[in-house]
Image (cartoon, coloured by chain):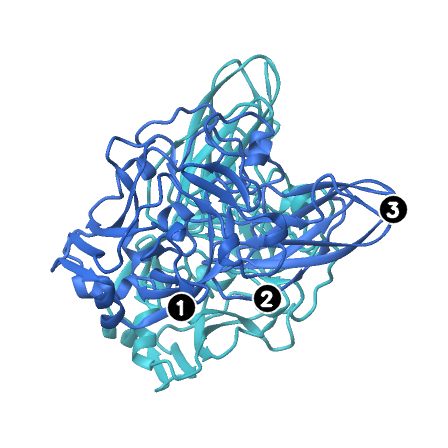
Chain colours: A cyan, B blue
């Protein structure tokens, strides 16, 4: 892994580990924390469900496992800051980490459907959003505030949204949110709250720091502040190249180009194109394992390059026939979120 | 209106009419026909519902009106060829019309929810798609084929999908599909089949010409053919400028810039930015009437320009923080569909 910060722990999956396959190994899966990993005894753990509900719940891990059917969803999680390094190449972004392409990964998540828990609690009139709070205090927020966020009730009722206790067939490791985390496929990773302790049905979206101040797309000249800019939520179409890597020197012969593309789930990756002539012509990459709607697609193609300098450009298309913006310059935002510009890799062939 | 073809009738809304407000008047609403307008006596009209259903239906207009609750949805329809002129400025596209920004419009549609009709028919096991066929024979397709297409059953069950008999409070005019048309908000106009006569529940998507051959996004060097390229369906984020118009000569003073933006419904228009310095800086436009999730947003802003030549560039952002691609060159496709490049308007200030 590539460690950006050790306390709180922030590390992205290496390009080498990403490239090994469409499923990301648990021990290589990216970690974006905002505070120390809380120590939670699973026997003492309770999940409180309250707010605009017909009945409040307090569920132990045993109750959660026994009361509801276990489900598995293969889902890609993606940090809103994934690929920020490309935006920081234009202007520095003080206080933020230069994440590369590895602030995203795909795992099989097991647990219960949030929808089943919400059915038991019952949404009271006026409920429109489902808030989540973890056990992790976050130094950058208001004193004493824990990490949290909310999603619309309509999304919360979808079968793909889980309260997960397992990842890739094994219990969640502490760093990934044990004993239970939320997994919201198709939303930025910040909504998949780890170390979940509280679910609050609300009339309005979460007003805590991590949704109302942080994780917002500010206009180019905008300053952060409560409610500034637009909230992030749904994941935008994106792709990146995993091989070859920028600056690599290759010998002549066929070059295999590999990478990932993700369209967010409500849309799927329809096509990935690769150009080695500055975008004048494009060839279609082969889409690899289809892991279902909530997961990225890995892709690969082979190009033939003469000796010299080359730039490989990639563009993914989603099922609405939307494609990625050309470059980072046209999407600059002060906190460096949602860089989904067409990836470009410069290589030398000798 | 700007008439592209008289037989079949194809005409787009003029920029002047689009600019009059967020609702498009019925008599200025774009028309994209593939055959002559069929003559249908509403008293004789029957809607057949068959295929993978539990019970076949044959519904008269009276039965449709009396058996189900009437609903209204304000929805933007958009032809997949909207803004094709921008792509044809790069290469000619023989056989296709150079639609400008007016192959789209917004109306209040009234009728019954398709979901209610499907509930009565009952989806049989294996049903995954809902096909629609109109009464209009289409010369460009296989001999005898009528215009048709399908949408996924999941979408067909959504409350916004209507079988509509009224538009902006009045009965549908013949050219817009009387007595009954489908309205599929968030999908390309080609799925909102006019002069509807047949609904077929199917295991697979429609294999007729207008979905399996036409209305597909081909790769840059691709040739049309059954199943070639990717099917179109969901509408991609788009925007265009309605004033000033390209080539306009203005006197110095404040210039009001106006236009529309549409994100397809599952996503909303979060922001519209305007640049008058080649994209170096951007200011946010004001978003006008919010007509609900299935309608575009009109927007406006005022810029101040010194005498000389200027280019106005616009970029919309949707609620996933995705924005439009920079220009048409990077999204060329042989049939000229889904031009959602950032609009550019060149003006002179004297």
Corner quadrant of residue A184: bottom left
Does residue B66 sit above or below A327 in this rendering?
below
Q: Secondary structure at mark 2?
A: loop
**Residue A317 on image: x %, y %:** 47, 39
Q: In the rendering, which numbered label is found on residue B345? A: none
From the image, tell me which residue sits under label 1. Answer: B72
Quick check: can you spot residue A181? Answer: no
Tell me if mark 1 has few (under 14), some (14-19) or many (20+) residues whose alpha carbon lies within 10 angstroms of its own.
some
In 3D space, how far apart are the residues under numbered discs 1 and 2 (Cα atoms)? 18 Å
Q: Chain of mark 3?
A: B
User: As drawn, is B252 to the left or to the right of B123?
Assistant: right
Image quarter of residue A165: bottom left
Q: Nearer the viewer, residue B150 or B221?
A: B150
Label drawn at residue B289:
2
Chain for disc number 1: B
Picture coordinates of residue B272, whole percent (x, y): 64, 55
Give the residue pinned by disc 3. Answer: B306
| Relative vertical location of residue A126 with respect to residue B68 in this rendering, above or below | below
Crowd class of label 2 (few under 14; some 14 to 19; many from 20; radius 10 Å): some
Q: Position of residue B33 (x, y in %)?
A: 40, 42
Left or right, A100 with respect to B131, comes to right
- Residue farthest to the bottom, as pictured: A55
Nearer-the-camera pick, B196 or B256: B196
Q: CA distance from mark 2 to mark 3?
A: 31 Å
Which of the pair A256/B5 is nearer the observer? B5
Q: Earlier in the sequence, mark 1 or mark 3?
A: 1
- At x 42%, y 71%, the residue is A153
Q: Secondary structure at mark 3?
A: loop
Residue B72 visible within the image: yes
Q: Quadrant of the C terminus of chain B?
A: top right
Nearer the viewer's eye, disc 1 or disc 2?
A: 1
């Amino acid at each position: 892994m590539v460690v950006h910060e050790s306390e709180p722990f922030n590390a992205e999956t290496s390009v080498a580990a990403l490239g090994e396959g469409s499923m990301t190994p648990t021990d290589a899966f990216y970690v974006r924390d905002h505070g120390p990993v809380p120590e939670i005894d699973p026997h003492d753990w309770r999940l409180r469900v309250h707010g605009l509900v017909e009945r409040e719940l307090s569920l132990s891990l045993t109750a959660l496992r026994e009361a509801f059917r276990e489900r598995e969803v293969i889902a890609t999680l993606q940090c809103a800051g994934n690929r920020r390094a490309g935006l920081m190449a234009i202007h520095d972004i003080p206080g933020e980490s230069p994440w590369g392409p590895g602030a995203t990964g795909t795992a099989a998540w097991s647990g219960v459907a949030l929808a089943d828990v919400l059915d038991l609690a019952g949404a009271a009139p006026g409920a429109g959003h489902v808030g989540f709070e973890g056990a992790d205090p976050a130094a950058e927020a208001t004193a004493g505030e824990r990490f949290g966020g909310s999603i619309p009730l309509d999304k919360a009722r979808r079968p793909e949204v889980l309260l997960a206790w397992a990842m890739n067939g094994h219990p969640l490791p502490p760093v990934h949110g044990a004993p239970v985390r939320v997994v919201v496929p198709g939303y930025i990773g910040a909504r998949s709250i780890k170390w979940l302790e509280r679910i609050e049905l609300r009339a309005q979206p979460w007003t805590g720091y991590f949704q109302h101040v942080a994780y917002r797309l500010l206009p180019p000249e905008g300053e952060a502040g409560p409610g500034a800019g637009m909230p992030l939520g749904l994941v935008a179409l994106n792709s990146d190249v995993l091989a070859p890597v920028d600056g690599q020197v290759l010998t002549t012969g066929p070059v295999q180009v590999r990478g990932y593309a993700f369209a967010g789930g409500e849309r799927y990756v329809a096509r990935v194109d690769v150009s080695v002539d500055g975008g004048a012509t494009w060839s279609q990459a082969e889409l690899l394992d289809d892991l279902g709607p909530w997961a990225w697609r890995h892709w690969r193609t082979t190009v033939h390059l003469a000796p010299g300098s080359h730039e490989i450009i990639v563009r993914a298309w989603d099922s609405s026939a939307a494609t990625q913006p050309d470059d980072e310059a046209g999407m600059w935002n002060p906190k460096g979120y949602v860089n989904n510009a067409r990836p470009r890799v410069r290589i030398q062939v000798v």
